[in-house]
Image: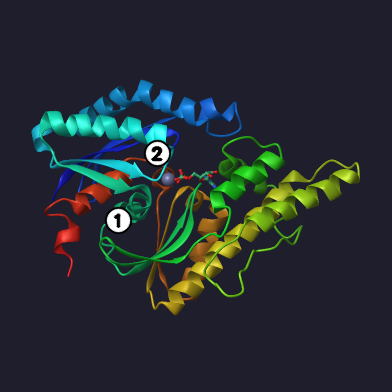
Amino acid sequence: MPTVLAIETSCDETAAAVVRDRTILSNVVASQMELHATYGGVVPDLAARQHLEAINWVIAAAQEQSALAWQDLDGIAVTAAPGLIGALLIGVTAAKTLALIHRKPLIGIHHLEGHLCSAFLADRQLEPPFLCLLVSGGHSSLIVAHGYGHYELVGRTRDDAAGEAFDKVARLLGLGYPGGPAIDRLAQSGDRHAYRLPQGKIPDAPFDFSFSGLKTAVLRLKERLAATGEPLPTADIAASFQWTIAQALVNRAIACAQQYHMPHIVAVGGVAANSVLRHYLVERATQEQIQLTVAPLHLCTDNAAMIGCAGACTCPGGNAHTSP
Ligand code: KG4
Ligand code: ZN
């Protein structure tokens, strides 16, 4: 069972973790959210500088909490792509340096494979094949995991990612950054059926997503309502928007699982933290008798434990080497 120190700095979280196979031994996340909230979104240069400030103590804290020494580690995993280049460089440079000094294998991990692997931390018995609904700030994808490291992208967004749509609509409604949690909170007091909004279906690609039309529809709705001079019903707008996205994601994931004969769906990524999406996924998966694994909240948004899990899988002795 490989044990890996993992580092994640692709966007606005400086994170380090120690993972043994599918067990988290430590998981430290230093969020930059407050810093970027001032600007209404992630500022790449500031993110890189902040990673530089935090990286050493975050790694030290993860190692200390794991109570392991360097000789107990089988490798160092790090998010190599995709992400903000200045931000990625900080994590990769730290990982390369540690790998060199301590003579450990360096394992570059694709950030999306990391998100997918958060499902293995959520369900330690989980085995491929399964369908992964990966919904984050930069991606909305349906991925068939045929085996460890053997993935097929069967659905993707044609424009905005789901998280991007949440963030942009939150900004339209004056809710600040990050938009997903703000909309999730406000929508609790709104009526999800107040407004009918487009789900962005693409006729010849039933498993692809398009959320830019939805975002524009919210903008037009806001303009129309603002013209009446009445206070803007932001909770109703947020609830209708959120319900539209949840339906688009969940119904397409269910149809996709059926088409590809996948008995199991896993949902991962920042948007999988959304409360309505989680409820609706459980409801529809139960109706259709599809098994479901949803990443726990603390593993939905960016963290290094998921990168460590992907790294442990790839290490000699990891699952990627033992699967048929
Ligand atoms: O996975 P993640 O942390 O970073 C990327 O890899 O992009 O996802 C961040 C995204 C942001 O767009 C954020 O608004 C969204 O996840 N998010 C949510 C919720 N929590 C975070 N979206 C909807 N509802 C939430 N509760
Ligand atoms: Zn992410």
Q: Which residue is mark 1?
A: 120
Could you say where residue 293 lies in the image, as x and y percent from the top left? Answer: 39, 61
Could you say where residue 288 lies in the image, as x and y percent from the top left? Answer: 48, 76
**Mark 1 closeness class: few <14, some 14–19, many ≥20 residues within 10 Å:** many
The amino acid type, in three-letter code, at marker 2 is Ser
Query: In this rendering, does residue 28 appear at all?
Result: no
Could you say where residue 309 lies in the image, as x and y percent from the top left? Answer: 26, 49
Residue at horizontal 82 percent and vertical 47 percent from the top: 223
In the depicted structure, whether residue 144 falls above or below residue 70: below
Q: Which residue is mark 2?
A: 10
Instruction: Classify residue 93 by image quadrant.
Output: top left
- Mark 2, ligand 2, within 8 Å: the answer is yes
The mark nearer the N terminus, 1 or 2, is 2
**Mark 2 closeness class: few <14, some 14–19, many ≥20 residues within 10 Å:** many
Could you say where residue 61 lies in the image, as x and y percent from the top left? Answer: 27, 27
> Between 161 and 121, which is closer to the camera in this rendering?
161
